[in-house]
């Protein structure tokens, strides 16, 4: 009887059976569902904070428009890296430096808006995915690549 109670308890742990538990490897970047959810919520909060623009830093006061593309949160939810891109990419390094200087203010504002035990510390980095996407697009438009794309596949010609 004690054995049955023990196995019933261990099978009910977490509300799921061991076989149906999704691993972190199944999710983007090896992050947990909670990390993704908190990161997305922080992205919305950061966008709102940056939109309101109540900053003292002269590099941020001038109405700089910043897009927050992604927020990656550490497994313990104490650190968050926000990937941002200033509108048009203008003065990107100056804007990133100003956001990192305003990190304490941003953390305080985020703490008021998110339901976490501790507000994460933010670090801001330039999102280079736009540049990478443009590079891939240029490569795909290259005449040699276009010629390869238009060739019939080897499997189709052997039939």
Image (cartoon, helix red, strand yellow):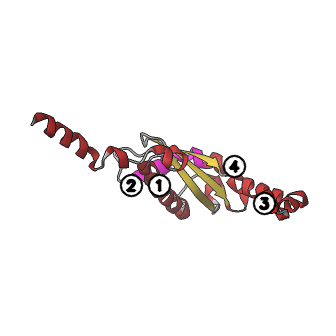
Position in image of residue 94 (x %, y %):
69, 49
Quick check: 60 left or right of 40? Answer: right
Secondary structure, mark 1, is helix
Position in image of residue 130 (x %, y %):
70, 57
Q: Which residue is mark 1?
A: 42
| Gap in angstroms between the C-alphas marked 2 and 4 | 28 Å
Point out the image quarter for the N terminus.
Answer: top left
Which residue corresponds to the image point at 70% horizontal and 48% vertical from the top-left?
A: 93
Q: Tell me which numbered mark, 2 or 1, is placed earlier along the sequence.
A: 1
Any mark on residue 112, and which? none
Q: Which residue is mark 3?
A: 137
Q: Which-is-in-front pick, marks 3 and 2?
A: 3
Position in image of residue 37 (x %, y %):
44, 54
| Gap in angstroms between the C-alphas marked 1 and 3 | 30 Å
Q: Tell me which numbered mark, 2 or 4, is placed earlier along the sequence.
A: 4
Q: Tell me which numbered mark, 4 or 3, is placed earlier along the sequence.
A: 4
Quick check: 19 left or right of 153? Answer: left
Q: Please, what is the dominant secondary structure of the magenta stretch?
A: helix
Whether tag 2 and tag 1 are in contact, CB under 8 A, the answer is: yes
In front here: 116 or 97?
116
Density class for disc 2 (Cα within 10 Å; few <14, some 14-19, many ≥20) is some
Residue 121 seen anywhere in this rendered image of the structure? no
* Residue 100 is one of the magenta-drawn residues: yes
In front here: 128 or 113?
128
| Chain part drawn in magenta | 99-111
Any mark on residue 94, and which? 4
Q: Which residue is mark 2?
A: 114
Position in image of residue 38 (x %, y %):
43, 52
Q: Tell me which numbered mark, 3 or 2, is placed earlier along the sequence.
A: 2
Density class for disc 4 (Cα within 10 Å; few <14, some 14-19, many ≥20) is few
Secondary structure, mark 2, is loop
């Amino acid at each position: 009887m004690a054995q049955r109670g023990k196995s019933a308890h261990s099978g009910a742990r977490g509300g799921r059976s061991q076989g149906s538990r999704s691993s972190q490897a199944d999710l983007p970047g090896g992050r947990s569902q909670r990390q993704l959810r908190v990161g997305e919520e922080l992205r919305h909060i950061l966008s709102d904070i940056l939109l309101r623009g109540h900053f003292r830093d002269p590099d941020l006061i001038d109405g700089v428009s910043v897009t927050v593309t992604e927020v990656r949160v550490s497994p313990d939810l104490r650190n968050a890296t926000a990937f941002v891109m200033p509108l048009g990419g203008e003065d990107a390094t100056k804007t990133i430096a100003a956001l990192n200087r305003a990190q304490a203010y941003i953390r305080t504002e985020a703490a008021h808006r998110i339901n976490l035990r501790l507000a994460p510390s933010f670090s801001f980095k330039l999102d280079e995915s736009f540049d990478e996407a443009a590079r891939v697009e240029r490569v795909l438009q290259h005449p040699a690549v276009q010629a390869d794309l238009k060739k019939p596949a080897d499997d189709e010609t052997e039939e």
